[in-house]
Image (cartoon, grey):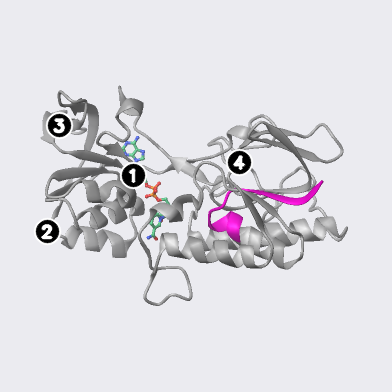
Amino acid sequence: MEKVVIVGSGCAGLTAAIYAARANLSPLVLEGGQPGGQLSTTTLVENFPGFPDGIDGPQLILNMHRQAEKFGARFSYAEAEDLDLTQAHIRLKADDEWIDTQTLIIASGAAARWLGLENEEKLIGHGLTSCATCDGAFYRDVPVCVIGGGDSAAEEALFLTRFASKVYLIHRRSALRASRIMADRVLACETIEPIWNTVVTKYITDERGEMSAVMLRNVETKEEKQLEVACVFVAIGHDPNTKPFAGKLETDPEGYLLVRHLAESKHPGIFIAGDVADRIYKQAITAAGSGCAAAIEAERYLSGLHQPEAP
Ligand code: NAP
């Protein structure tokens, strides 16, 4: 029987692991399909307190991983698949095996959203991606486009200017949703050309099946035009990773896990942290904060100190 199992190894999961490990609970962290979470595919993080010159996302994650390991956290690449709440304790299925645990911290994060266009799945890795840090360097001296108007799109577009000859930023409205500082940087950058009020309606491939262009539609004029690009970077937000818990734990209408008070779920012994429950802030520091709260609540639950909040 495990004391604490943590699903997810992003900022929330690793912070929970640091706190649980320092409390001598020897947590088992299931890293799953995207170890390190979203920070592992980002670039410079400028708003995590304590790093006045910024820190690379993957380095920040690596530091947290080492810190958790140093205090006794254990890591597995297993991926959570199912949850059984019919027993006196919690049972979690991961990579076909059931794990028995007294407490569970769900910090499974969120996954990139896609447009839902024809052939989308097949094109991932062939000129279609959601990760500029992973794939940007493959597209040197060629035009590329980023879809979206939030901070992720702004960050991806700025990063891609290191490689691409031109970065088109395709946004469905005429104003960016990104924070002021990021929006100003994007709009001041000569290599980035915003294409406003426009959506991508089709991916166009060459004879090798690689992305060669996109079909655009102006949502106001309805005018259609083709834009030659070697790669499309989709940055239109994320959806919470809740598949293993479907039907077992409460979600809001958008699919985010419901948290009653800080990191506490309705089910005794289950605590929730990070983007899987955060529809609003989605910041590394808020994920870390809720990871800390989840681990403290788990520790209190295990020691019998936990007083569930009134519903
Ligand atoms: P986001 O803020 O939700 O922005 C998503 C963007 O994609 C929006 O501009 C949205 O358009 C557009 N969009 C959504 N669905 C679309 C569709 N089907 N077709 C076309 N466009 C679509 O997501 P995000 O940029 O990933 O950011 C998520 C959170 O992480 C935010 O809180 C952000 O501040 C944070 N973040 C922070 C940093 C940083 O601080 N450096 C970096 C990355 C992310 P509309 O504007 O019209 O809704």
Secondary structure found at label 3: loop
Q: Where 257 falls versus 163 (above or below)?
A: above
Q: Which residue is mark 4?
A: 78
Q: Where 206 falls versus 234 (above or below)?
A: above
Q: Mark 1 near mark 2, Cβ–Cβ under 8 Å?
A: no
**CB of mark 2 near ligand 1 (< 8 Å):** no
Q: Is residue 227 visible?
A: yes
- Which numbered disc, 1 or 3, marks the residue closer to the eye? 1
Q: CA distance from mark 1 to mark 3?
A: 24 Å
Residue located at (22% from left, 28% from top): 203
Earlier-in-chain disc, 2 versus 4: 4
Residue located at (24% from left, 51% from top): 137
Earlier-in-chain disc, 1 versus 2: 2
As for residue 5 lying within the magenta part, the answer is yes
The amino acid type found where label 4 is placed reads Ala
Q: Is residue 19 left or right of residue 276?
A: right
Circle number at residue 221: 3
